């Protein structure tokens, strides 16, 4: 199947045969803009006129989260990006507002983007997508280095979830990041695990790490679990006011392959060798 190159198509839908699961996407940044699994609305549609401005469901590449001063240095060269936010960071990579090519199958969608020497400074072929499954929903990505030398790459996903009434979020993470006034990590602290009462926890914008972490949200309306592979970093964020068209409470649960500002603090951990492909995956499974 040839990729669809029509940037005027704003929304694409997937529906299971029995119609109990529905997913909707925007071509801009490959965003997840609506998700109902087995008639449970996990991701209501956005209420904001400009969803990329709040990173609604977007894919974050070639780095997730913040990049200090919009710069990093590699192999003797400084790379600079913009625009800078009020804290003088560049947030969430380079494709938030890109109209991506895509393919649609019966129950899955694949998006395509190629980073070039002109826009990123490195040649990276990125494919990512989503599929409705018998137990829920999957997201995946593959990044291949097309260049002749090693290249930095990291990725994150930014879905906002409806909080299902009174709920508890638990995560099997082992480190919490300590940040400065610019929301850049400056230290970590060891933790045993994480439990958060929702929606009681009104302020939340924190990063965590855990090998093969798992997140469980147990609520009055429904419960679900998120697992991942090669996305060992986790961001949790509570938007205020609501970003959903129904006005309900929400939380961003963001699987990421790197922490904020990783290209300035641990770049060697996020290099792809020439010809190498790195894979990333997460799954949402309904629990009831």
Image (cartoon, grey):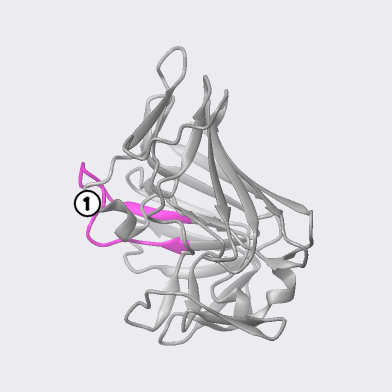
- At x 49%, y 64%, the residue is 93
Q: Residue at x 77, y 63 (%)?
A: 148
Q: What segment carries the magenta color?
A: 236-253
Horizontal and vertical percent for residue 173?
Answer: 62, 62
**Residue drawn at (64%, 83%), measured in percent from left and top?**
77
Question: Would residue 1 be seen by someone viewing this image from the given angle?
Answer: yes
Q: Nearer the viewer, residue 275 or 66?
A: 275
Residue 66, relative to residue 140: is it above or below?
below
Residue with the mark numbered 1: 48
Direction from residue 269 to residue 130 in the image, left or right: left
Determine which quarter of the picture holds residue 91. Answer: bottom left
Q: Is residue 98 left or right of residue 67?
A: left
Q: Nearer the viewer, residue 106 or 201?
A: 106
Magenta: main secondary structure: loop
Residue 223 picture location, percent across and down: 46, 39
Count of marks, rendered view: 1
The N terminus, quarter of image: top right
Q: Is residue 77 magenta?
A: no
Residue 285 visible:
no
Check the image and report above or below for 168 versus 151: above
Question: Residue at 46% across / 84% down in the picture?
Answer: 69
> Can you give x and y, in whole percent of width and height, for residue 22 in the image?
40, 26
144 and 2: which one is in front? 2
Q: Is residue 240 magenta?
A: yes
Residue 83 position in % (x across, y down): 37, 74
Picture layout, residue 79 above or below residue 227: below
Q: Looking at the picture, does residue 252 appear above or below residue 11?
A: below
Residue that lies at the very extreme toward the top in this rendered image? 18
SS for dot 1: loop
């Amino acid at each position: 199947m040839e990729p669809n190159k029509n940037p005027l198509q704003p929304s694409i839908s997937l529906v299971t045969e029995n119609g109990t699961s529905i997913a909707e996407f925007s071509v801009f940044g490959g965003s997840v803009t609506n998700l109902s699994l087995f008639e449970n609305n996990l991701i209501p549609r956005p209420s904001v006129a400009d969803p990329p401005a709040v990173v609604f469901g977007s894919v974050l590449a070639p780095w997730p989260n913040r990049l200090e001063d919009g710069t990093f240095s590699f192999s003797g060269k400084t790379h600079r990006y913009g625009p800078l936010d009020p804290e003088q960071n560049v947030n969430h990579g380079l494709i938030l507002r890109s109209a991506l090519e895509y393919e649609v199958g019966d129950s899955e969608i694949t998006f395509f983007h190629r980073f070039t020497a002109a826009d990123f400074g490195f040649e990276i072929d990125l494919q990512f997508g989503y599929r409705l499954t018998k137990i829920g929903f999957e997201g995946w990505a593959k990044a291949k280095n097309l260049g002749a030398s090693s290249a930095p790459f990291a990725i994150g996903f930014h879905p906002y979830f409806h909080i299902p009434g009174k709920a508890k979020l638990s995560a099997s993470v082992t480190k919490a990041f300590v940040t400065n006034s610019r929301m850049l990590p400056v230290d970590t602290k060891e933790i045993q695990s994480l439990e958060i009462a929702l929606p009681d926890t009104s302020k939340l914008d924190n990063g965590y790490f855990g090998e093969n972490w798992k997140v469980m949200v147990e609520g009055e309306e429904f419960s679900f679990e998120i697992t991942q592979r090669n996305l060992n970093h986790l961001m949790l964020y509570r938007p205020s006011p609501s970003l959903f068209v129904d006005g309900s409470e929400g939380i961003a649960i963001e699987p990421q392959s790197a922490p904020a500002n990783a290209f300035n603090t641990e770049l060697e951990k996020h290099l792809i060798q020439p010809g190498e492909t790195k894979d990333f995956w997460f799954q949402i499974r309904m629990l009831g």
